[in-house]
Image (cartoon, rainbow, N blue to C red):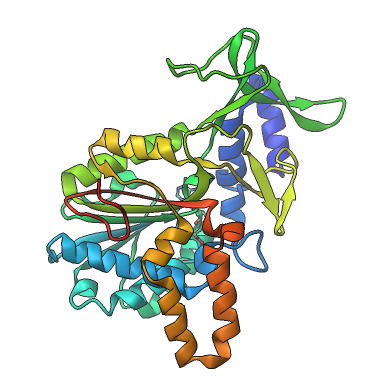
C-alpha cells in the first residue's frame, strides 16, 4: 500500500504517462486519504492560510445582512435555501446567521445547506453552527441542492481551490502542461503535450512560452448555479482573488505554514490554489440564465455595505477591541492588502443584489 500521495502519483504516471495539472491539483487537494483538505483544518494562525471571515467577524455579518436584504427584495418567501460552498470552519456562516437575526422573519425562512467535501471541516462547521439555532444539511456537490425554493449562494475562497488546466504557447500552438516524475532529480516536473490541445475555438494571442489557464470545473459549476438561479430565483455572492479579462500567466501557487511552497513538492501537504478568472465565471452564470453584475473589489463592496460604520459601532461598544477592529478592517479593505486583489461577483435572478451597480 502506498503511504503517501507522491508514491501514488508516481505509480500512476509510470503506468499511464503524464497527468494534467488539473488532475495533480485535484488529487493534491481532494484525494480521499492524502488530499490536503481531507487531512486537516488548514485555516487560521496555526494552519496554512487565513481568510477574510477568519480575520474579522464584520465580514460574515455584512454577508448575513446582504442575504437578509436579498430575501426581503425577493418578497420574503416562507422558505429560502441559504447555501455556502466550501464553508471552511463555518465562521462566515456563524457570523452571517448572528447578523441575520436582525432581519425579522429571515431566520425562520432559512433552510441551510453546506457544500463541503472535507470530513474534518464538516465537523468544525457543525461545531461553529451549534448556537445558530439552525441545522445544516451537507452536500458533496451542488447537484443535490433542493429545487423547491429560491437560493442564496455564498462562496469565499472556494473557486480558487478548483483544479485548473494550463496551456503553454509553443511554435505549434497551445500545448497542455502535464506533470511527470523525473527519476534523475527524484521530483515531479512539468512537461508538454506533443501536439496542441487547446480546447477553445478562439486562441488567445501570446508569445512563445506564455501560459494560459482554464478552470473547467469552475465554469461548469457557475453555469449550473446560473441555471438554478434562473429556475428558482435568488442571488449568488462570490469572493475570490483573481483577475479580469487579461490572462495573467501562471498563477498556480502553494502555501504551507503561511509561506509560499513548491507546488510540485510533497502533494497533499500544502494548499494549492490558482487565481480565479472572474470574468469567465460571470459569463458562465449568464450562460446558465442568470444576470451577472459588474465586478467590485472586496474593498469597494464592503465599504458600500457599511463596514466602516460597523467597525465604529463595534469599537464604541467594545473599546478594548478598537485596535484589533481597525487592523481587521484595514486588512479587508486596504488596496495593498485584500481590498483590491479580492473581487466580488454577484449573479442573480429576480433581485437587484445590494451593493452592486444596476445593469
Ligand atoms: N470559505 C472558507 C474556506 C475556504 S478554503 C473561508 O473563507 O474561510 C476552501 C473550502 O472549500 C474548504 O472548506 C474546502 O474543504 C472546500 N472545498 C475545496 N474543494 C471543494 C470541492 N470540490 N467541493 C466542496 N468543497 C470543497
Q: Residue at x 74, y 43 (%)?
A: 266
Which of the image's four quarters has the C terminus? top left
Would residue 130 be visible to someone looking at this image? Answer: yes
Residue 287, compared with residue 72, is above or below; it is above
| Relative image position of residue 225 (x, y in whole percent) | 30, 43
Left or right, 80 with reference to 161:
left
Residue 292, compared with residue 220, is above or below; it is below
Q: Residue at x 19, y 69 (%)?
A: 109
Left or right, 327 with reference to 162:
right
Residue 331, compared with residue 224, is above or below; it is below
| Relative image position of residue 78 (x, y in whole percent) | 13, 66
Q: Residue at x 43, y 72 (%)?
A: 307
- Along the viewing direction, whichever of 99 and 220 lies nearer the viewer: 99
Residue closest to the far right: 184
Left or right, 80 with reference to 274:
left
- Along the viewing direction, whichever of 308 and 33 lies nearer the viewer: 308
Quarter assignment of residue 335: bottom right
Amino acid at each position: 500500500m502506498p503511504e503517501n500521495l507522491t508514491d501514488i502519483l508516481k505509480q500512476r504516471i509510470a503506468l499511464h504517462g503524464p497527468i494534467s495539472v488539473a488532475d495533480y491539483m485535484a488529487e493534491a487537494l481532494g484525494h480521499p486519504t492524502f488530499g490536503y483538505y481531507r487531512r486537516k483544518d488548514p485555516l487560521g494562525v496555526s494552519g496554512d492560510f487565513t481568510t477574510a471571515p477568519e480575520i474579522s467577524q464584520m465580514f460574515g455579518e455584512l454577508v448575513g445582512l446582504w442575504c437578509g436584504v436579498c430575501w426581503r427584495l425577493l418578497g420574503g418567501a416562507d422558505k429560502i435555501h441559504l447555501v455556502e460552498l466550501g464553508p471552511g470552519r463555518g465562521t462566515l456562516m456563524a457570523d452571517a446567521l448572528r447578523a441575520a437575526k436582525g432581519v425579522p422573519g429571515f431566520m425562520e425562512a432559512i433552510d441551510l445547506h453546506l457544500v463541503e467535501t472535507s470530513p474534518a471541516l464538516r465537523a468544525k462547521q457543525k461545531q461553529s453552527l451549534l448556537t445558530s439555532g439552525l441545522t445544516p444539511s451537507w452536500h458533496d456537490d451542488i447537484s443535490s441542492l433542493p429545487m423547491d425554493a429560491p437560493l442564496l449562494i455564498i462562496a469565499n475562497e472556494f473557486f480558487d481551490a478548483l483544479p485548473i488546466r494550463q496551456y503553454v504557447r509553443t511554435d505549434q500552438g497551445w500545448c497542455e502542461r502535464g506533470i511527470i516524475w523525473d527519476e534523475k532529480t527524484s521530483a515531479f516536473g512539468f512537461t508538454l503535450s506533443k501536439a496542441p490541445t487547446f480546447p477553445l475555438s478562439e486562441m488567445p494571442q501570446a508569445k512563445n512560452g506564455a501560459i494560459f489557464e482554464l478552470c473547467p470545473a469552475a465554469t461548469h459549476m457557475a453555469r449550473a448555479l446560473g441555471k438554478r438561479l434562473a429556475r428558482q430565483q435568488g442571488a449568488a455572492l462570490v469572493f475570490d482573488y483573481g483577475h479580469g479579462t487579461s490572462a495573467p500567466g501562471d498563477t498556480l501557487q502553494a502555501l504551507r505554514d503561511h509561506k509560499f511552497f513548491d507546488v510540485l513538492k510533497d502533494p497533499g501537504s500544502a494548499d494549492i490554489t490558482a487565481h480565479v478568472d472572474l470574468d469567465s465565471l460571470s459569463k458562465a452564470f449568464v450562460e446558465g440564465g442568470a444576470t451577472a453584475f459588474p465586478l467590485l473589489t472586496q474593498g469597494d463592496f464592503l465599504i458600500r455595505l457599511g463596514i466602516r460604520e460597523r467597525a465604529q459601532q463595534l469599537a464604541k461598544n467594545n473599546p478594548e477591541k478598537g485596535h484589533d477592529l481597525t487592523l481587521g478592517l484595514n486588512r479587508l479593505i486596504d488596496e495593498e492588502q485584500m481590498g483590491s486583489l479580492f473581487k466580488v461577483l454577484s449573479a442573480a435572478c429576480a433581485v437587484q443584489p445590494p451593493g452592486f451597480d444596476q445593469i
